[in-house]
Amino acid sequence: MKGEKLFDIRKVFEEAQKPHQNQAKLVASLKHTYNELQDKDCFHEKFVHYLKYVMVIYKREPAVEQVINFVAKFVASLYNLEKEDAEEEVENPFLNYLFTFLLKSHPANSNAVRFRACQLINKVLGSLPESAQIEDELFDQINTAMQLRTRDKVPNVRIQAVLALTRLQDPKDDQCPVVNVYSSLIETDSNSEVRRAVLSCINPSAKTLPKIVGRTMDVKEIVRKSAYQVLAEKVHVKALTIAQRVKLLQQGLNDRSESVKEMVQKRLLPAWLNLAGGNVLELLRHLDVESCPEVGVLALNAIFLLSPCQDLIKKNSELDDRKTIPIEKLTAESALYWKALCEHLKAKGEEFLEEVLPEPAIYADYLLSYFQSIPELSQEEKEDLACIEQLMTKVYIGQQLILMIGCMDITEEGGRKRMLSVLQKILMIPTMSTSLVSHLTEKLLCLLRDDDRRIQMVAEIISEVRQTIVTVDKQQDASEIRKQELKLAEIKVKLMEAKDALEKCVAMQDFSHASVLKERIIELEGIKSGLLKEAEESETKEICVEKSDPETLLKCLMMCNQLLKQVSLSKGLGPTLDGIIESLIIPGITSINPAVNMAVLCLGCCGLQSKEFARQHLTLLLQVLQIDEMKVKLSALKALFDQVMIFGIEPFKDRKIQTGNEENESEKTKETEEETATTHNLLQLLSGFLDSEFSELRTEAAEGLVKLIFSGRLISAKLLSRLVLLWYNPVTEEDTRLRHALGVFFPLFAYSNRTNQECFEETFLPTLQILFNAPASSPLSEVDVANVAELLVDLTRPSGLNQHFQNCQGMTVHDNLALKICNEILTDPSAPDVRIYAKALCSLEFSKDFTNDLMDLFEDILVKVKDKMSLKMVEKVKNNLSKGNPIDGHVSKEKDIAEVAENNLDCNKPCTSTCQNEEGDKIITPIEDTENTPVKPRPRRNRATGLRKVEVQTEHKSGCSRTKGSESDREIQQPVSMAHSKPSRRFKTAELAKTKMDLSKLLDKE
């Protein structure tokens, strides 16, 4: 009987492997066998014996997984049985025996054994009921063992260890070791599935919540998606700060992955909306839309997509009969919701928009009544923060109401004229906030189509805003004053005489004559009061004067700046604009109030309208660049770059009026030298900001110079070298915008034509020599020179050129570069730099007709160079050439970069899509083929693995772009194919050819 029952264990294990087997019956059968046995130890040994056959299999076979699940169910059934039979706590010998065996097996050398041991511990602990208890000693042993396995080299083992620790964590204990392990793994583990497993197991708490929120920026799409899922299911919206809520929605709804966007839109936002009682306005209050209106609009648009338009219209119950929200009920949230709903319905069709938006004339009156209801704060109220907050809320609501004008149909003449009149009146309100002036002016100018009408109307509004009526003392002539005094004295005498006569008549009872005197007295009293009033009025008078306070100047300059943005560049400066420049813009620049920055912007825009004006006021902009504050300097620098971009460098040369025959050759030569010196000084000034200690100036200067180079206004190998060094300089490591702009520019410029690649070829040796000779105190001494060499080799790769330039005959850029590198090696064969040059030779692409010319140089190098590694690399290149196999470090592919150039050159935020491999921090970009992607500066300090980075980073080895994989998570990164399109800009127009100038000699001048 005993042998038969022991034989049942093997039979049960065999049956448990079958996919459609009823495991509940097997568990019951085996449990019956176990209960009938007196000697449990023999059963334990046999059970573990058969279990070992399963534990040596690493592959996730279905049969093996069935057995693992069966074991977990069987152990749980024994635990339930003993708990039912015993009133007091009783030891479970089988559970203890199994855990002891698994804990002894977890440090095994076999990956499979470690994996299955952790998996069984996870399954068994997970199958136990919620009220289950285990011995303290066993708890500590499991805890210690699984924490050790979370540092295993195999990701699958770490995953199972993480899952096994789920029920052992105590989120209420800040010092819980399991929580500490989770907090470390979720940030530092190199495998995305491990990080994802931690997200599914970790319990949200004050300590772990920031870690969970941080995973929404993970490089892996699946981890980011899991993080948002955890936040939607386990975290209340009120547990997050306003900053965290805003950040989550901003990143999630703008994520490059559609699945992550869908998770935020369909899971996170509805969860938050349910927690807000289904009230969208309450959800907007959680987001503080006054501070972050963009995020509020993103959230509303995502919510709108989940409901049909008719339902959205029905839910908007705050509108009255005029289809407006009563002014007393307007809040920041309702105004934003109204505006966002109108924009959404306008995109769907005009028939929906008519249900929530009034006619333009009605809305114009509504807008005017709202702005007239905004009170002016007294001096005491200006010191009260509550009053200031209320005023700021009203200003925000007004901004949303102004933006709603863009949703209206203004083709109807009556409504358009009424709206135009109302906007003029609102701009003339003395208490109008400066933050609304730009929006109001923009909408006003959009209603006008003619530039002359726009200029005239803005000039009239500026004149009305600046004019004010004041009362002043009037200076009168002494003779006039004397005449008035004599006349007044004469009336007083007559009045006294009449009163005396009246008294006499009354005494004599001559009432008829007394009535005549009384009328005479009344008449004289009227004349007297008139003279007195006239004397008082003559002391003061009302006159019109121009206001020059900072707030008024700022308002007028804002209107002027918006006007100059709207007027076409071909319009030019007329008498009206000239008057505004002389009376408003120039005085604004010389003032000391905050309007200076806006005046500089206006001056820059005026320079774009007239080449002569730009030349005349160049000195003024240069002075602003030298002496003003940072914000104003940035505006002046942008204006200078814009003007050089439009007109070229020619208008900014110092030119003298020619005097015909009187001018001799020496004078001509002198003037030419002066013009060249002026040009050189200007370019030196602009490029000098690349070395500024302020990151804002560095970034603005780099972007401006990049635009000039890309448009063909500027050609300089030395400047390209400076930009490359700036990109690698550790000082700019935190300048995300700067590094992104340069990272986009380098491949787009280099691969557009061969001439540009020749510029990079010229920068190769000078750039490397600067890095080789950099002193230890210089930040450039930390730069990886080999990485820089890889970048320049990639940028000059012939296969990276557009198809139009790839079929050119003759020597390629890499052929010329190979000659320079070989000659540089032979110049000093014993230098330590030879190894970098030899490595660069291995990545070059040689033309078939040029291979023979290099053989002699390679022979000389092999004779003179002593470094073994360098010799090995040169020998490899030589052997490949001798066999007729041209060295091709990268696979040649078509570069479709014109569309990226048009869309991304001026971007302020990163647009490259990055992803992380499973075992390290290497980043690759699927936006372009990695063969033609520039090498990114390698990081100089450790960062938490798994965090998304904006920099583009590739690892090249032996001419190939490779990424590491992991045993558990292998993924193939597939580049996104981009449609080939011609560049939208034309680089060789007739006007550009006239002003284009090769400035390399000037910039290379020492």
Image: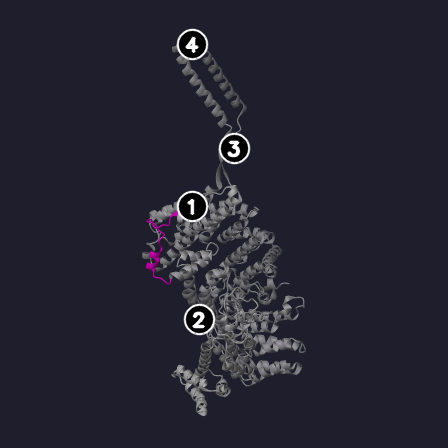
Residue bearing the label numbered 3: 472
Above or below: residue 203 compared with residue 156:
above
Q: CA distance from mark 2 to mark 1?
A: 50 Å
Q: In this rendering, would 202 be left or right of 782?
A: left
* Image location of residue 472, percent across then percent down: 52, 32
* Image location of residue 506, percent across then percent down: 42, 10
Of the residues tagged 4 and 1, which is closer to the observer? 4
Residue bearing the label numbered 2: 978
Q: Residues within 10 Å of mark 2 (few under 14, many from 20)?
A: some
Residue type beneath disc 2: Met
Dot label at residue 505: 4
Q: CA distance from mark 4 to mark 2?
A: 115 Å
Say which quadrant the C terminus sits in.
bottom right
Residue type beneath disc 4: Cys
Q: Secondary structure at mark 1?
A: helix
Q: Residues within 10 Å of mark 1 (few under 14, many from 20)?
A: some
How many numbered discs, if any?
Answer: 4
Quarter where residue 342 is shown: bottom left
Magenta includes 313?
yes
Of the residues tagged 2 and 1, which is closer to the observer? 1
Chief SS of the magenta region: loop
Residue type beneath disc 1: Phe
* Image location of residue 178, percent across then percent down: 54, 71
Residue bearing the label numbered 1: 371
